[in-house]
Amino acid sequence: MKPETLRPKVLLEGVRYPDLPRLQDYVEKGVLTRETLAGALRQSCAAHAGRIALAGPEAELSYQDFDERSERLAAALLQLGLRPLDRAIFQCGNCNELLLAFYACLKAAIIPVCALHAYRKHEIGYLGKLAEARMHLVMGDDPKFDDVAFAVAMQDEVPSLEFVVQARGAQRGKAVSLAGLIASMPLQRARELLADVEVDPFQVAVFQLSGGTTGVPKIIPRFHNEYLYNMRAVARWNGYTSEDVLFFPTPYMHNLNMGCFFGPFLLTGACVTVATDLGEQSLRQLVRDYQPTWFGVAGPILTRIAPELLLADESVRARRRFIGPRNAAGIRRATGSPTYHIFGMTEGVIMFARAGDCDEVLNTSVGRPVSEHDEVRLVVPGTQDEVPDGVAGEALFRGPYTIRGYYKSEKEDAGRYTDDGFYRSGDLMMSRIIDGKRYYFFCGRIKDVVDRGGEKINAEEVENVINLHPDVLISAVVAMPDKVYGEKVCAFVILRAPERGLDLPRLCAYLEEAGLAKFKWPERLEIVAEFPLSAAGKLSKVKLRQAINQTLEAERAAGTATSVKP
């Protein structure tokens, strides 16, 4: 096998492609194939043409509908002026149109940049410039935010952003309507145009995003054949079938949903429910109408659908499967259904607990990697010295779907990998042998992030914006516990002039003006005269977390606990 056959014809600047010796080994062993994600989805659509692919209150799309509409959209985007390997920012809430656009871009070899609907100028400006994106997909019918006007304004900030595509609603301004694009392209003509598009299995399929540990999110290149392998490995591990129905209303552009749920489900011929409205009645109706078999729910969503779940009889509850990062025992008690933990990272390795694992594993472990080719080392943080079983260490990962570097980040990547290509995750884990198998247990993070209902918020990024406030001398952002979201952002601030004061509404107004996404705003502000120090004389965030925990406990005991929703 010639090494050059394992590289795409066009090497994108800033992309770290997999190391050739290891890639060649995976290909020769049949782990990674020469299939593309677009091609595999086409095969699934052909095999399951009459089955329902997408289902919800707005519409049901069969696999044939899904394939044909995305075919027409893919060709229309190319006719509009986009080219294969162009980048397209996806800033859109969950809807049928988002999944159609995603599939269309895979077919046209246009690379989606998987942004969040909640992002604003701060994040979109950075990502658009970094990726040199040419297209910006927005919702178009958000009653709370004019994202079409926002996207048009971002064209002045990001010179490469030539096209604004509006997913929904009546076409406005300079935006191009997604529905209009589909209507403009006959199916036969679309097939003729797409026949000339070469989609390479070793080329980038998607620009995913990290949660960000040193500032705004980093771009993570995911390649066609390895992302396809990731999805298939998850489907095999969990035993997804074409009879399954998914309820997972977290953002589709999250790697968690894309790589572990809607992606594998569509490859399996299963049904993906689409929730455009996250209100309690809409979600309960979705559960009632489609009887999902797999659920991924964070605290707020589970609370909304719990009354509906409890109406089911014991046999229905037993058929359901719930996935969560923590508290499987609690979810199991609340729903009466099997519940499994997950550990995953956009950069690579995915782990699940699953049926057949013992109670100890189901209640406390994140299970095992979904691929036998995933490699895990647990080491003393910052070293390559492995720790024994039962001792927490930094998790290092290597495998067929673990990335070899971030986009345009070669210099910074030097400290993120070992000499033999293991990725330093920054997560603390321990392992134990149980029933003859090695299971992993998540023990926390080395990284300075807040996990708000699954959204990873980089503390330094928020601090950098807060520190620009004219009344702020310095800030420190930490996680504070929350029963619903798991964690929320708490900002400790030292003021330049304490007599001037600063309250949370004023700070949040400033952050809105600065263009910081709303879910990153602090939900608690603590004004302090000084920060606690560690024994080494450095700021101690451990002590700050302890301080806010103690304050919250005291307030709960006194019945005065407060929380401000941004």
Image: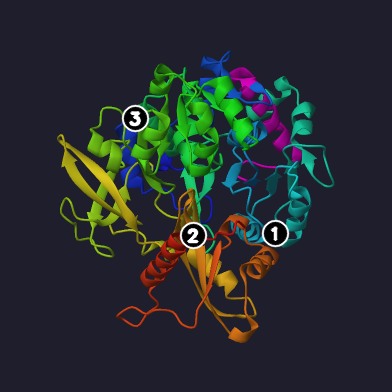
Q: CA distance from mark 2 to mark 3?
A: 46 Å
Would residue 367 be seen by someone viewing this image from the given angle? Answer: no
In-front residue for pair 289/159 = 289
Which residue in the rendered view is the most extreme toward the top? 50
Would residue 331 be seen by someone viewing this image from the given angle? Answer: yes
- Looking at marks 3 and 1 on the same chain, the residue that comes earlier in the sequence is marked by 1
Residue type at mark 3? Answer: Trp
In-front residue for pair 96/359 = 359
Q: Which residues are magenta?
A: 61-88
Does the magenta stretch mainly form a helix, a strand or a loop? helix
Q: Where's residue 442, x and y in %? A: 31, 50
Residue type at mark 1? Answer: Val
- Looking at marks 2 and 3 on the same chain, the residue that comes earlier in the sequence is marked by 3
In this rendering, would 377 be left or right of 136? left
Residue 75 lies in the magenta-colored region: yes
Q: Quadrant of the C terminus?
A: bottom right
What is the number of callouts on the image? 3
What residue do we see at 58% from left, 61% from top? 521
Q: Where's residue 25, x and y in %? A: 30, 39
Q: CA distance from mark 2 to mark 1?
A: 49 Å
SS category of the residue bearing label 3: helix
What residue do we see at 24% from left, 34% from top? 359
In this rendering, would 453 be left or right of 546? right
Residue under circle 1? 158
Report the mark closest to the observer, 2 or 3: 2
